[in-house]
Image (cartoon, rainbow, N blue to C red):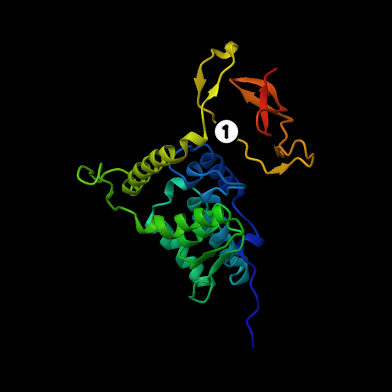
Amino acid sequence: MSQPVRKKLIEVALPLDAINKAAHTENNIHTGLPSNLHTWWSRKPLGVARAILFGSLVDDPGEYLPADRATSKRDELFSIMAAIADVERSDEKELFARATKEILQSTNGQMPTFWDPFCGGGSLPLEALRLGLPSLGSDLNPVAVFITRVLIELAPTQALHPPINVDDRDTFLQGGGKFDGLRRDVEYYARVINERLVERIGPCYPEATLPKRFGGGQAEVVAWIWARTVVCPNPSCRAETPLATFRRKIDVFGSTSMGFGRAKTAGPPAVIFEGLWM
């Protein structure tokens, strides 16, 4: 005979004030979190993600205790949930051991496998892993898959590892964050890759000539618009025409301007766009 399904804590009550306060605090931290490294849609605050996971896995005490004892036990679970919602306490092993123990008591001593089929920036798989759950994630977008794999596969294996790049490997002293070695390697090899890319394809991205009212001279282009092209069906033209539109407001040199394109043919059949600043 199967056991009756118990309500989970999240179905009965949550310490919402504590969770909201922790979310507000985390959203105002601008360094040291995965969301600070790569922007992604609908980023879940890490502390809130693990608090919600915890509340979804532990049984509500009212399912197995008398009402008076259930209230006391529920307050204890609320205190754990409020504590793990605090992103500043992410490295407290004793706290997460308590959370894991409560989850095991509600899952017959066996951790369920967590799977997020639309993992996005990876907050939920990462925090499920921190709570001790076997964690899986998937996404249609390869960028999301890459971000999540770095968070839950690569980064944990590199904790407290010294850097391997030639600039830092002989002078690095461990004493800061546990991922300082990884951070220095990423910064070093990002510079190396950028220098090689500039050398190989830099000529494809020339500098722009500034209008006189912006000081004139040359300046680096901060964004390029790539577009598909079609060949003009006119036999006397046959120019390759970009399928691009410029009907949008853009911020140029700190002022809001309207950028749009004007097409013309020149020399061999071709269509070029000139930016018109208003």
Farthest residue toward the front?
236
Query: Depth check: 127 or 56 in front?
Result: 127
> What residue is drawn where x is 65% and y is 28%?
267
Place residue 210 in its image quadrant.
top right
**Label 1: which secondary element:** loop
> What residue is drawn where x is 54% and y is 30%?
222
Q: Quadrant of the N terminus?
A: bottom right
Place residue 245 in its image quadrant.
top right
Residue named by callout 1: 223
- x and y, in percent, of residue 136 in the image: 53, 65
Query: Depth check: 1 or 199 in front?
Result: 199
Does 123 sit above or below residue 7? above
- x and y, in percent, of residue 157 in the image: 36, 59
Q: Residues within 10 Å of mark 1 (few under 14, many from 20)?
A: few
Amino acid type at image mark 1:
Ala
Q: Quadrant of the C terminus?
A: top right
> What residue is drawn where x is 27% and y is 50%?
162
